[in-house]
Image (cartoon, coloured by chain):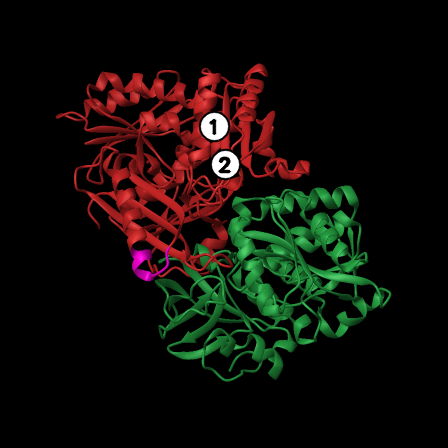
Chain colours: A green, B red
Amino acid sequence: MNAVTAEDLPALAAGAHLLASGAGRTDVDGVLHWLSALLTEHGPVPLVQPDELAPDTACAAIGLVGSVTALAELPMVGDEPLQVVRALEARLGTTLGAVAALDAATANALTPVAAAASLGLPLVNCDGMGRVFPLIHQTSFALAGVSLTPLAAVGATGDTLVLDATPERAERLLRAAVNVSGGWMLTAMYPTTTARLPSAGIVGSISRAIAVGRALLDATDTDDLAIRLKAQAGSRVLGTGRVVELEHRTRPADTGHPAYPSSIVVRSHAEPVRLIRLEAQNELLLALVDGAVAAAVPDIICLLDPHDGHVIDVESVTVGSEVQVVVVPAADVWHTPQGLALVGPRSFGFPLSGMGHQGM
Amino acid sequence: MRIGARLSGRAVRGVLADAGHVLGQSTAVGARALGTVLHELGNLAPHGVRSVTLEISDLLVEAVRRPRTDLGVTPVSVLRVLPRVPRHAALADHPSSTLRSFVPHRTTVSGGHDLFGTPLAPLDVPSAVEAAREARRLGLEAIAVVATGAVGAPGHESAVAKAVLDAVPDLRVSLSHEVGGMGLLVRETAAVLNAALLSAAGRLVDRCQRATRPLGDVPCWFATGDGGRVSAERLRALPVLGLQAKWAMTLLGAAVLNGRDNATIVVEDGTTCTIGEVRDGLPHVAADLQGALGVRLAAPQPVLTTTGTESFRAGPERSLRGSPDVSPVVIGNGDLDLATVGAASCEPTSWVDLVVHAGSTDELRQQQRATEDRACGMVATSDAPPGSERIVESSATALAYVRAGTYRLRVRAAAGARP
């Protein structure tokens, strides 16, 4: 594909929802409505491979930092993409020629499209996560040595922030600003040139999210969905059952991460009955079946409604919810020693050794 | 003995029931149908009728779908309270064309709070009053007020309501926090539907109360989408609560008739099967779902799936996948309207959905208990038998990517002993 059109948006939103690993939210209707209007006004956004642009084209990753629930409560005003890119350009003293995605998951698959449409720029078909991680330096861009800062951030309140700091300091400073700015800010970070993206970015993330979304939207039933998701994303089903327990603060919290840890216990229906324990902190991070590790971050653990295949978010899970636990392998870069050091189970406080694709 | 009745089009169907047993049925069509049905069923109750519960969701949905009819909705104004005015028309508007069709006037004024109750911008009361005056000049009778953060901090919505009612006393005001729920758009949907339905619901409630009067001093209640019931006055103020009641009452009625407190209910209607669930004697419900109007709503409603009847019969296990219920209740077309049985059996309920901050698990438990007490209090003030309140569901889930210790609490309470 070489463009993102208004017709692609439902699939992009659906795929991005699955790739959020339980951290998404269904009601991005307002963002979709706005984005659809933008694409109708400005035409489709060109979706380009990194090597299709001149190597010295300046670009940056666009993404919302903060809570999607806060975004649902405090919608965007509409000028944030323009404001944040202009703020970063002013700091850099250069004009961007393209934008990329910070992470092609949750609403963050949509915000770079909005930025590209608002600014009349091409969208590079890559992101820095291939899913979503909680910290802004947990990216393939950072692994490849692209500087996270300077970064710019704009909130719905009109606050504009430009940060120069180390990645860890930038995370903390930005998070503090997000918390007083209504719960989210749109950011432009990792300023670089498109020459670096083939090695620093996870190439194909936007088209992958759309393909995964089409599998979700086009499936005739959950059997069909499992087949389509396996073909599209190499997914596997861990089990289907009913949530029997929700627990909070089940393990020590790393103060550097937003949100406290929680656990979800699912009792499977199929014989033999199994207990699937899901450890969450923002996203679903670990799945244990009868105490044995069955999947772990960086792979994408997600929940589907076993009746209709809709993605279920951790936030909307209640005791009694029916769920199917599905695992989608993460991008290859996350299974390298450097990738696992940055986003593997140990970086989230689980004392597990690195795991290969498809877990164990 | 209780009467449950369902009003749909010009027809009314009702039952007289006692402890889950149907003692009599009645059906009538026409302007006096409700009075006829209540009279007939009342005559079957030798010791009188304890209550009448009416299920009117078909009429409310019809009012929304056919705004220009006698019982149709009236156009409303929307007033959003946000820190900044949207810079793109699509963000100033609602994504649902159904909603937009009866909102000819909308304004955004400065104000609102974040998820933790901190003000994001000072409230611009003069602009809110001017917007209300303009709405009245345009001939609008109601205004829906939606402030960001209003579930946790309703102050700006309340302040707008007071100022608007002082300045334009004949304008009716609907506030989003009164329905509750997370998300500005889903609350706006509820507030707009409320405002648009106020007149129609008022006329319906009047009609129902008039028809009930000959039964004597019998309370007239209205069924709600979460499987409970509310007083006539509450439905008059919050008609949106009754919008999705039909399926909630149908699931409840099917479970009651089959003596099941926990069951998957499959209702076959021609070529379509609708599947829902009853848990602990109440329909399984959720907020943020798309209902009969195809628009996401903050008010709770039954979780339903549909499938083809032939497909269901060929392989029921495929349609019931994920359900632990090995013997679902399958209901075909019959004479008995299940929703009337559900209406005759339902009890008061409440639903609280909010965001809290808790620094420790103890503090979270404390907040959860306080929310549970609040939910029980809401049940207790809805004509529930004293001391009968119980917590049906109480969940806390951590919100992602926001200040650590932020949780969404959802608590559902109901009257009646736990099954």
Contact, mark 1 vs mark 2 (Cβ under 8 Å) = yes
Q: Quadrant of residue A151?
A: bottom right
Q: Is residue A57 left or right of residue A101?
A: right
Q: In the image, which disc is placed on residue A310?
A: none
Which of the numbered marks, if any, corresponds to residue B160? 1
Give how far across and how far down residue A172 sits, in percent.
55, 63
Element class at badge 1 = helix
- Mark drawn on residue B147: 2
Say above or below: A225 vs B307.
below
Amino acid, disc 2? Ala
Of residue B236 and residue A163, the one placed in the foreground of this image is: A163
- B350 vs B129, nearest the viewer: B129
Q: Element under label 2?
A: strand
Q: Is residue B364 magenta?
A: yes
Determine the chain carrying the residue at label 2.
B
Q: Report the magenta stretch's main SS.
A: helix
**Mark 1: which amino acid?**
Val
Q: Is residue A239 left or right of residue A10?
A: left
Query: Residue A183 placed where, x, y %?
Result: 53, 51
**Which residue is at 35% across, 16% downward?**
B32
Q: Chain of mark 1?
A: B
Residue reaching furthest left? B47
Q: Which residues are magenta?
A: B358-365
Across the whole image, how many numbered discs are drawn on residues? 2
Count neighbours of disc 1 (C-alpha within 10 A) and say few if under 14, some if 14 to 19, many if 20 or more: many
